[in-house]
Image: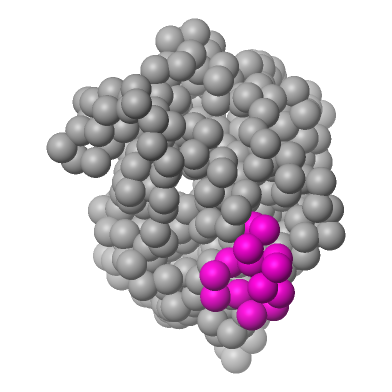
Amino acid sequence: MANRYGSQSSAAVSSEGVVLDPLAAKSLTRDVAGDCMLMNNDALVRKVIWKIVPLLALIYLLSFLDRVNIGFAALTMNADLHLTANEYGRAAGLFFGGYILFAVPANLAMHRWGAKLWISTITIVWGLVSLSSAFVSTPTEFYVVRFLLGSAESGFLPAVMLYFTYWFPPKVRGRIVASFFSAAPLSNVVGAPVSGWLLNHSIMGLKGWQSMFLLEALPTVAFGIVAGLWLSDGPQTAKWLSATERNDLRRVLDENRQTQLPHSSASGFKLAVWILGLQYFLLVVGLYGFGFWAPLIFQSVGHLSAQTIGLFVAIPYLAAALCMYVWSRHSDRHGERFIHLSVAAFLAAAGFLIAGFSTSLPVVVLGFVLATCGIYSACAVFWTLPSALVQGAAAASAIGFVNSLGNIAGYVGPAMMGELRTSTGGYSMGINVMAISLLLAAALAIGLRWTSKPVITGG
């Protein structure tokens, strides 16, 4: 998508086409005239939101379900495949090997070929790969499928974050990202009870975990096809918008870019995306460290049935879906990101500490409720930063890089939990390590509040 910027005498452009903003970080959240124009046109805002966000959120829900349902499969699959705790932790994290390798090229491909074709294609592919998980018979086959699943899914989240920049200015993007991101915890609200139930049932002679993989992958393939028929590459090709609406939306986005002209060097750009990647890494340690192990943790605390575990796992994620939306709207309303991110990360750390030092099931549930509310609220606020800090031709690679760097923790978190479970015989140490990671995330957000400079790249 082409991007046009007005001229400004103080702006300097590096040889890499990167320009940086010398203003303080608080300028990131200043009012923009174009934002106000769009926000005042409620009918247009609602029309765009309802056209693209629900479908993308539903696909994200399915992607999360396809990657974390192994937590339930592990209750019976590990014995069938002869997986130890260490091996399961590594297999869960191996998903992110492919995810990290292909996130940046995948987002560049989306930027080049368009959202409609790219999102549809990768959704269908990862649905088919997830379906194949039902037919693995050895640990090695399971490792390969997990790697391929991560490779296929790698392009989706950063592609959607980039796609939103085509439609929404930063002033309203917080609530948009939160609405989309709410699909992640909701995938557990829906998927946990269903997965727990499917473990005790079978179809066509398959075992419970095989039936679960098969039945939960089919909707992904179906909605991948729907995406190819439903989405537009951007406002300029959206036939469901009138010519006047397309012009209004384009003018808002162009004026927003023109009012955020920057100045500096490519080194500042690189530093910014590395810092954002580190921030996301610290959040993801807790996100997936808990996500992949939650059913096994609840089983160890309460000695519960698979169906009961499913209900207990759903509780924290339902609370998280509600909290993240409220917290993101609060962040939008006050025009502030860093403090909101820090408070949410601190809440997550406190929740993990409560759960890690208790053996009482109600207290553990309470701790995980606080932890998931904090993590998902922090992630929703966080993802407003890359798309606001980085725009233009470098946005695709920058957002993909932040996602890749952060998702290294997708391997580290689950693998760390497996190693500590084996060495200590329990989950408390691993939970406490996740708490430390979230505390560091909270501290880094505070540091960014006072030291970082917004980055806008020209294209």
Quadrant position of residue 297: top right
Q: Position of residue 279 (x, y in %)?
A: 44, 27
Query: Residue at horizontal 50%, vertical 17%?
Result: 25
Q: How is the image coloured?
A: one colour
Of the pair 7 and 135, the residue shown nearer to us = 7
Question: Which secondary structure type mostly characterizes the magenta part of the structure?
Answer: helix
| Relative vertical location of residue 65 with respect to residue 227 in this rendering, above or below | above
Is 241 colored magenta in this rendering? yes
Q: Residue furthest left?
A: 15
Is 306 on the left-hand or right-hand side of 265? Answer: right
Query: Residue at horizontal 61%, vertical 26%?
Result: 29
Q: Position of residue 190 (x, y in %)?
A: 75, 60
| Relative vertical location of residue 112 with respect to residue 204 in this rendering, above or below | above
Q: Which residues are magenta?
A: 235-249
Is 322 on the left-hand or right-hand side of 102? Answer: right
How many numbered marks, from 0 up?
0
Is 182 on the left-hand or right-hand side of 378? Answer: right
Of the pair 325 and 355, the residue shown nearer to us = 325
Is 205 colored magenta in this rendering? no
Quadrant position of residue 204: bottom right
| Relative vertical location of residue 137 with respect to residue 253 in this rendering, above or below | below
Quadrant position of residue 64: bottom right
Q: Position of residue 189 (x, y in %)?
A: 75, 53
Is 295 on the left-hand or right-hand side of 150? Answer: right
Query: Residue at horizontal 73%, vertical 49%?
Result: 38
Confirm whether residue 419 shows in the render.
no
Of the pair 352 and 338, the residue shown nearer to us = 338
Confirm whether residue 1 shows in the render.
yes
Q: Position of residue 199 (x, y in %)?
A: 65, 67
| Relative vertical location of residue 209 with respect to residue 360 in this rendering, above or below | below
- Screen quadrant of the N terminus: bottom left
Query: Residue at horizontal 68%, vertical 48%?
Result: 176
